Structures are given as C-alpha cells and as structure tokens.
Amino acid sequence: MADGEEELKTFKDLGVCEQLLEACESFGWKTPTKIQIEAIPHALEGKDLIGLAQTGSGKTGAFVLPILQALLENPHAFFGCVLSPTRELAIQIAQQFEALGSGIGVKCATVVGGIDMMTQAICLAKRPHIVVGTPGRLLDHLSNTKGFSLRTLKYLVLDEADRLLNMDFEKEIDEILKVIPRDRKTYLFSATMTKKVGKLQRACLKNPVKVEASTKYSTVDTLKQQYRFLPAKHKDCYLVYILSEMSGSISMVFTRTCESTRLLALVLRNLGLKAIPISGQMSQAKRLGALNRFKAGECNILICTDVASRGLDIPSVDMVINFDIPSNSKDYIHRVGRTARAGRSGVAISLVNQYEIEWYLLIEKLIGKKLPEFPCQVEEVLLLLERVTEAKRISLMKIKEGTGRKRRRGEDDDDEIDRHIAPKNGRKPSKKSNKR
C-alpha cells in the first residue's frame, strides 16, 4: 500500500459524507478495513471496480457506502442491484443496506428462492431503491412480474463472483445483463480471479480499477489451526470428544453433504449437545430460522455444508471443525474464515481420515504451512465409543422412521429434529461407559 493510502485511517478520510459517517458510527464501524480503504475512494470517483478480498474483509461495506452516497445525491427507485450466490448472503447484504441507510430512508427489496414470489412482487411494486437477490429469482421477476424492470439502474454489484459462476448462474447473469442499462457503474467482488470471472469482467465492466486486500490465499494470524489424523470409523467419536472438551464454545462443524448435517445434528443432540443443521435441502424459512437460533445462542453448534462457508457474518464463532475435508482446498480458507474475525482469536481443527490425506496436503500447500496435530489421548476419546455408536443407531432409526411421516405431513428436517431429540438436559457426554 502506498504511503498516502496508509494515512487514510477514517471513513471521513475516504470521502464518505457526514450522514453516512453517523451511520457507520451507529453500526459500530470505527475504522475502515483494507479493502474499504482501497475501494471506496475509486468508487466515489465513479469508477468500475474489481475487488479481490478474502472472506471477512469487510467488502460489503466497500460497495454499500459508495452506492448509498450516490443515492443521496440522486435518489430514485431501482437505483442499485446486488447479485449474490446464496439466499442467506443476499438477506445479509440487504440488512446492511437498510442498517446503514436507515437515517436517509433507504428502501430495500430482497428477491431469493424459497420465499413466495407474490410477496416479493408486492415489495417490488413499492419501488425500492435497492434490490438484492439471487440471479435465478431476480430473472424470474424480470420475466414475470408485471411493471418491474431495472431500466433506471445506476449500480450493479456482482458479489462472490467466482461462486456465482461456479454455481452455474452464468446463463441467468447473461440474461440480466441484456435487460439493464449499459450506462451504469459495476462492481465485481470475488475471493478468486478465475478464468470465468475474467470473462465476466470483460463482458460487463468499463475500464475497471482493480483493488486487492490480499494477493494470496491466507488465514489470519489470530487463528490457531490444527489437524487430527484418525481412522474413518472413529471420526464421530473425535468430533464428540472435541465438542465436549470445548463445551462453552460457539462452534461451526462443516460436512460434505446435506444428509451428514442432519445425521450429525441428531447424534449430537441425542448426546445432550445443542446442535442445529443448516443445508441447501432445508426450506428457506428453516435455514433462516436455524441461522437465527445459532446467532441468538439458543444452539451453540451449527452443523453445515459449504452453504455457510462464505459471506455469512457470524462474529461470535470460537471454533470451526472440518468434519469432512473439502475436496477444493480454497474452500478451507472460506470455512475457517468464519472464526478469528475482526482481530479476535479462533480455533480451526480438521479431522483427517485415511481417505482424505491428499486433500489435506493440498490445503497445507495452499496456506504455505505445516499445521500442528490436535493433542489428545486415543484411549480417552474411545471411552465415548459406546455412547456415540448408540446415539448414531438411534438417529439413523429416527431418520428412517421420519422419512415416511415427513412425506405424509409435508415436514422438513428441522421439524424432525425438534420433535424427537430436543435435549432434556445440557449435560455434555460422559466419557464413562454406559454398560447396564
């Protein structure tokens, strides 16, 4: 960073106006992050932006503030549009627009799948200033909602662009680009600069300024990272042991599949641990409900797929456990970025079985360091084996029993969890054998 840029220590130095300075202060933003320092001055000058930043870098603020400042100068409906790869991230971005824009009367609409289209159409009919959504649902409204268009759009943001394209939204984005004004400002934010992102950049940005908060994949210094090599058949046992040892922690456990999130949540709750799953197979209402219960502290363990590894700001997470090692090593960076945010410390533990060694070695190569092993006595861990095996047997039985009932009643995973196994006490699992 240049010397002149190092001197920029406040949002006022970046050129943010007085009304938004007050909003930043009330929002708890005291000093800008590196990506905000790099991006906001160029955005306020009216430049298109490509922002490369690791997760948790504050990039949402880097595009929300310039758009709100421009809106103040020229207020009108459908002023800005943000495209996000996931429903949860879209809702979170909309909340930031509303929070920072509350003092200036900003209206925002969120259009995502899993929620009634008519309700969203009524919201769009009120002509909000900002629309935030996932590409598929936004295109549905542009095609089918009478009277809705983005012909007056001044700002387009493509957030998590690499993930938007990896999730096969390329066709929808192309269709959206055809029906919005070419004379607009475009911001493209991405954790990685892939070939697809480069192609999208050439298609929709004009002479963009490239800003970076990080030039390589890295994890923050306040994050303590460890691994544990173990046999696949004992992985459940090690997970329960770690969660029991760290029973006061707010934890996120990442799995590879939606089915695993549900099974693990059932197993853990059968053992008296307050776990809740979130995955793409759950309805939108249940996903948001699970996330809110986790944020509120009702459950201190969130079992999730990579749907929760990027974008979601859950600042109180103490520990991330990789129950399944990600096959794409870059996903590791995003997962462990859920903890040790904004200068806080955090722990990340990866459980590596005999089939995942190759993926784990790629992670160490990516982050450029050999990680220490999580210390524990195998004999102590295996004292839990009988209880964990029994909890898993009961959980599998409940899932099998519940499948037919869910089909008849139209329920989903969380109904099943709440009905059968809300823990009757908060005790953590005993390591003593439970023989009768």
Image: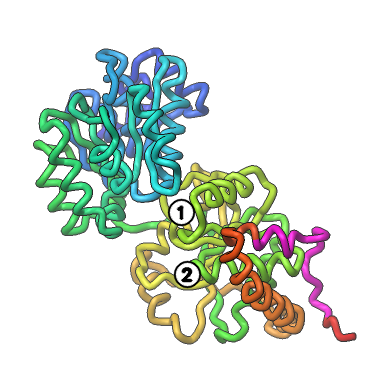
Q: From where the camera sits, is residue 78 visible?
A: yes
Question: Is residue 427 shown in magenta?
Answer: yes
- Could you say which is closer to the camera, residue 93 or residue 222? 93
Task: Say the numbered circle drawn on residue 85.
Answer: none
Q: Residue at x 40, y 36 (%)?
A: 118
The residue singled out by tag 1 in the image is 337
Residue type of the residue flagged with mark 1: Gly
- Residue tagged 2: 257
Most common SS among magenta residues: loop
Residue 237 position, x and y percent, is 66, 78
Name the residue rendered at 67%, 65% in the picture: 243
Name the foreground residue: 100 vs 166: 166
Disc 2, SS? loop
Left or right: 436 in relation to 245 = right
Q: Quadrant of the N terminus?
A: top left
Q: Given the image, on which type of amino acid does mark 2 rest?
A: Thr
Q: Are marks 2 and 1 in contact (CB under 8 Å)?
A: no
The residue range painted magenta reads 416-432
| Any part of residue 33 in sight | no
How crowded pointer 2 is (Cα within 10 Å; few <14, some 14-19, many 20+) is rated as some
Name above or below for residue 235 compared with residue 209: below
The answer to which quarter of the image holds residue 238 is bottom right
Residue 249 in picture, x, y percent from top left: 67, 55
Q: Is residue 157 above or below residue 228?
A: above
* Label 1: which secondary element: loop
